[in-house]
Amino acid sequence: MAKNSSLSEYLTVATDVAKKAGEVIREGFYQTKHVEHKGSVDLVTETDKACEDLIFNHLKKHFPSHKFIGEETTAANGVTLLTDEPTWIVDPLDGTTNFVHGFPFVCVCIGLTIKKVPVVGVVYNPIMNELFTAIDGNGAFLNGNPIKVSSHSKLVECLLTTEAGTKRDKATLDATTNRINTLLYKVRSLRMGGSCALGLCGVACGRIDLFYEIGFGGPWYVTPFLDVAAAVVIVKEAGGVIFDPSGSEFDITAQRVAASNLLVKDAFVNALQQSA
């Protein structure tokens, strides 16, 4: 694993370029979008592509020996898989549908894995000016201020966030809505923000207590971890726990993730299992 000084350098470079990409997103947010479809409801814009190019060019300039995986290029084309090498995992615009509709939950996600373990995370929402950052072993921060997960210990006190995903077949939709219906009896309320990364960061800063998503990404992805690699570090460093919705250990290569504080994890897992 890299030394802390190296991780700090990685974080600084990633934060700088996230802000630059954020400027591109902010400018495009208030303009007419040119939209392409990756699936029936999943979208991509020229802003996604421009931000990914900007981020990769910047990171490659500073770290030419590192590996790179991005949503609009390498991952979509299936040419890069996660290895033990230092690997930058970039979702240039998580929440593209929000971006297209002018809904301000959009973000840049830049994560670094070493030996397949996320160790650096930057998630930046340029519309709301919220910058979440973390490196392994050094805590998590929102706009430079330390953050931590909530202290709620009962599900009925908890705010739950999830996402509907991009699949629209009847079996998937029935499973999704049935799960939500069951969970709504046990929690205070539910939200869908449209960004997996921001949902996880919401857990990290305590504004959300519970988050899960099953089947994120789409069939065009060979790397389903683009939305979570950066945010996973942030949640862990804020004192939260990341796990599979089944209760088993989180697998970064699976299309499944859940997060909470430690106090409600077991009850949350039980509720998810009962809702399956």
Image (cartoon, helix red, strand yellow):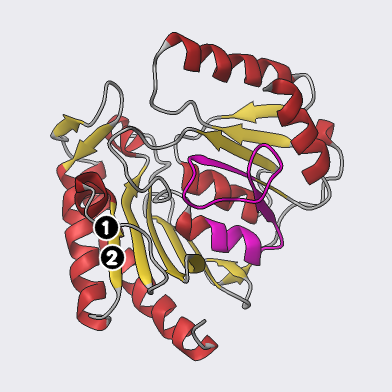
User: For the point 34% across and 78% down, which residue is it?
Assistant: 13
Q: Please report contact status of discs 1 and 2: CB closer than 8 Å, yes or no.
A: yes
> Of the residues under marks 1 and 2, which one precedes in the sequence?
2
Residue bounds of the magenta highlight? 232-258
Q: Is residue 157 above or below residue 110?
A: above
Q: Magenta stretch: residue 222 in it?
A: no
Q: Amino acid at mark 1?
A: Thr
Q: Magenta stretch: residue 255 in it?
A: yes
Name the quadrant containing residue 31.
top left
Please indicate, yes or no, whether residue 188 appears anywhere in the rendered image: no
Q: Position of residue 9 (x, y in %)?
A: 41, 85
Foreground pick, 66 / 208: 66
Q: Which mark is residue 68?
A: 2
Q: Position of residue 272 (x, y in %)?
A: 71, 30
User: For the point 38% across and 73% down, which residue is it?
Assistant: 85
Which quarter of the image is occupied by the C terminus?
Answer: top right
Q: Going by the image, does 134 lie left or right of 226?
A: right
Q: Which mark is residue 80?
A: 1
Mark 1 or 2: the one toward you: 1
